[in-house]
Structures are given as structure tokens and as C-alpha cells.
């Protein structure tokens, strides 16, 4: 795509015209929309769009930041594993400061002598395993449908290369079952969704159709430029004005309605659906991915007998309420006082894609 085309998505005249149409479509009625993607959260703040939105629009950030939804019990499992002799943990850097239920982090474990390595991709973890044949290298698999195919491919790669000391601890999560839980909650009060662009590039349009068919809400797959987001909001406001519940793909330059069949085939080969714990939400049936029996040799959960047991949330942290759209980050009593990006209490302040961090960075009062 040429930069000229991308420029159009920032064009102030185009944005202003869509904003005017959005105001007209709202017709004074409130619209509470939720985005379920950390990249959207940041894009809405960083572009300055949030401060330009009509007052009728209420922006909620849902469970779309992969680090934020990783449950305390899953972080505890990472920490327990890090302390086992002969284990090297390989992880993306954004998990290093996320606290488990006891407030401990991988960064603290590393400082105490645990072997924890930050990697930039799953193949880096395979390389680490090949370089350390005396150890077991465990890659921490967190994230949604977007990152899971790359992890699946790495398991195939390790098998093909005969790197037998490589393991994956899979806590991947699936977005559609979480939407189902949010919409089933009678207290949720979400009018409409902006759907995640990256996840949708893999799963396509079809898995979202129940948002309209079962729950009567409109939803739009959107890109990340200001005009993308404004056009999605316009679509949602027009649906509400016209009494339509529809799901649309408004990110066609990247997302095909049918998604990416090759990536889904990779997921289906390596993983099987499983129940998963989400931070602040709890157990969601069928919302996770476990390594299939065919690839059991690479499954850290089986190898180390890891059982995930629900545990209480971090004391005082309201991440669960924030992720469900029931509380704005700055309504948490710890926001900006006991909890800041320099000294975060919960994952929504740790991750750069977390809504508490965005509220703090962009100074939402
Ligand atoms: S401000 Fe901090 S303590 Fe409060 S919900 Fe956000 S991350 Fe948790």
C-alpha cells in the first residue's frame, strides 16, 4: 500500500466530514461502544481521536490486551516453572512485569536467579533450546488468534529440526467466546463493538455473526487509522439509528471475510480448544487453545504436570471490572496513586496496550 493511500486515513477534511455525519447519526443518543483490541485502545488515544469524539460516545476498552487477560493463576504457573532447575523460560518482554496473585513477577524471579530470557519470536526460543541442550526451554504462549498461528508453526519447526528440549506453555485465548460472555451479562450495557483487525485477519467475519443474530448488537471490524475508527463508529451509530443489528467488515484492505484459512489450518493441526481462565472474567468454556495429543512432546503443561487453579485477584486491583467495561481505569482507587506505569499494580497498567496505561499516559482525568 502506498503512503499516499495511508495519508487519506489521516486526512483532517475527510475525518471532519465523517465526524459530522457521526454527530448527525447519533442524534443526541448515547452510544456505548467497546473495542476488544489493545492496538485500538492505543490508536484511539494516540491519534487524539478520543478527545474529539462527540460527548454521546462512551468508549470502553474490553478484554483485548493479551497480557491484561492472562490470569493471575497462569502467571503463577510461569513463576513456578521459572523456579524449576533445568528450565529456561523464553518470553516476550511484555510479560516480564505482569504480577501473579502473590504480586511476584518474572522480572523479580529473574533478579533472584531464575533463567528467564526475553525473545522476539518463537523461533528465537527454538534457537535458545538448540544452544542449551542441557536445559528445557519453555516458551510462554499468550495472546489471541493473531499470535497463536506463529507459535503453532514454531512447534512444527522444532519437530522438523529435532529440537526436543523445546516446549510451549499454551495459554492462548480466543476472542469470540469472550464476546459471548460480555454480552450474556445483564449488567454489561455495551451497545456495539469495534472488532479487532488483527484477530479478524485470521478468523474472518463469520465467528462474530452471533453478536448481531443472538444479542442484537452491531459490530464492525476496523483498521487502526483515525478514519478507520471514525467510519466504524459511523456504521455503529447508523445501525442503532436505523434499528439494524449487523456485523460488517470495514477493514477490507487487510481482512478477508473468510479470514486466513491457512493460518486456521495450522491452528487446527497443533491445538485443540480448551476451557481457559481470563483475568477478571473467570473460566470461559472453549475459549483457550491446548496443544493437541499429536504434539504432546512439546507441551509444557503435560511435561511438568501443570494444573491451573483459579485464585483471588490482586488486592485492590480493579482490572477485572475495567476489562468488562464496568469501570473506567481512573475510577479505580489506586489509579495514578498506588498504581502508575513506573510502579504498576495490575496488568492493565503494565502493558503499553492496557487501558489503565493509556489513561495514565494520555492524562484522562
Ligand atoms: S489502575 Fe492499576 S490497580 Fe487499578 S485497575 Fe488499573 S492496573 Fe489495576
Image (tube, rainbow, N blue to C red):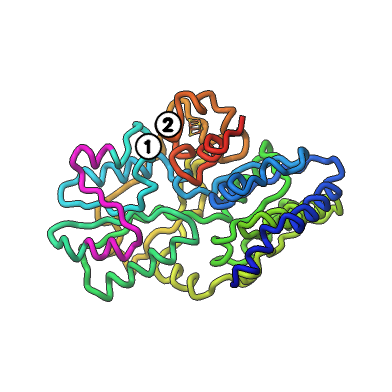
Q: Are the residues tagged 2 and 1 within 8 Å (C-beta)?
A: yes
Of helix, strand and loop, which one carries label 2?
Answer: loop
Mark 1 C-beta to ligand 1 under 8 Å: no
Q: Indicate the quadrant where residue 321 lies.
A: top right
Residue at image position (34%, 62%) is 122
Can residue 93 be spotted in the picture? Answer: yes
Residue at image position (67%, 57%) is 10
Q: Indicate the quadrant where residue 185 lies.
A: top right
Is residue 39 depicted above or below 68 in this figure? Answer: below
Residue span colored magenta = 108-128
Mark 2 C-beta to ligand 1 under 8 Å: yes
- Magenta-drawn stretch contains 101: no
Cα separation between marks 2 and 1: 8 Å
Residue at image position (45%, 61%) is 147
Residue at image mark 1: 99
* Local crowd size for mark 2, using a 10 Å CA cut-off: few (<14), some (14–19), many (≥20): many
Amino acid at each position: 500500500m502506498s503512503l499516499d493511500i495511508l495519508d487519506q486515513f489521516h486526512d483532517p477534511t475527510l475525518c471532519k466530514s465523517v465526524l459530522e455525519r457521526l454527530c448527525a447519526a447519533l442524534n443526541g443518543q448515547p452510544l456505548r461502544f467497546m473495542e476488544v483490541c489493545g492496538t485500538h485502545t492505543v490508536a484511539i488515544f494516540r491519534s487524539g481521536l478520543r478527545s474529539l469524539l462527540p460527548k454521546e460516545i462512551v468508549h470502553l476498552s474490553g478484554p483485548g490486551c493479551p497480557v491484561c487477560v492472562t490470569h493471575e493463576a497462569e502467571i503463577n504457573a510461569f513463576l513456578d516453572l521459572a523456579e524449576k532447575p533445568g528450565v529456561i523460560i523464553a518470553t516476550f518482554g511484555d510479560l516480564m512485569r505482569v504480577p501473579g496473585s502473590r504480586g511476584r513477577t518474572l522480572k523479580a524471579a529473574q533478579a533472584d536467579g531464575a533463567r528467564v530470557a526475553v525473545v522476539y519470536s518463537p523461533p528465537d526460543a527454538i534457537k535458545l533450546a538448540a544452544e542449551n541442550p542441557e536445559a528445557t526451554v519453555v516458551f510462554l504462549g499468550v495472546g489471541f488468534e493473531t499470535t497463536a498461528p506463529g507459535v503453532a508453526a514454531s512447534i512444527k519447526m522444532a519437530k522438523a529440526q529435532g529440537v526436543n528440549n523445546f516446549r510451549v506453555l499454551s495459554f492462548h485465548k480466543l476472542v469470540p467466546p469472550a464476546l459471548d460472555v460480555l454480552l450474556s451479562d445483564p449488567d454489561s450495557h455495551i451497545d456495539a463493538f469495534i472488532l479487532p483487525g488483527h484477530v479478524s485477519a485470521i478468523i474472518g467475519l463469520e465467528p462474530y455473526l452471533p453478536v448481531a443474530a443472538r444479542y442484537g448488537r452491531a459490530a464492525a471490524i476496523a483498521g487502526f487509522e483515525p478514519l478507520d475508527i471514525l467510519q466504524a463508529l459511523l456504521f455503529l451509530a447508523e445501525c442503532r439509528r436505523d434499528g439494524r443489528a449487523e456485523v460488517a467488515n470495514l477493514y477490507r484492505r487487510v481482512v478477508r471475510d473468510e479470514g486466513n484459512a491457512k493460518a486456521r489450518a495450522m491452528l487446527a493441526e497443533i491445538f485443540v480448544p480448551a476451557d481457559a481462565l481470563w483475568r477478571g472474567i473467570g473460566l470461559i468454556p472453549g475459549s483457550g487453545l491446548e496443544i493437541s495429543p499429536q504434539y504432546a512432546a512439546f507441551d509444557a503443561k503435560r511435561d511438568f504436570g501443570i494444573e491451573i487453579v483459579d485464585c483471588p485477584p490482586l488486592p485492590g486491583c480493579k482490572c477485572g471490572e475495567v476489562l468488562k467495561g464496568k469501570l473506567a481505569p481512573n475510577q479505580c482507587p489506586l489509579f495514578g496513586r498506588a498504581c502508575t506505569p513506573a510502579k504498576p499494580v495490575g496488568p492493565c497498567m503494565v502493558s503499553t496496550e492496557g487501558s489503565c496505561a493509556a489513561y495514565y499516559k494520555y492524562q484522562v482525568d
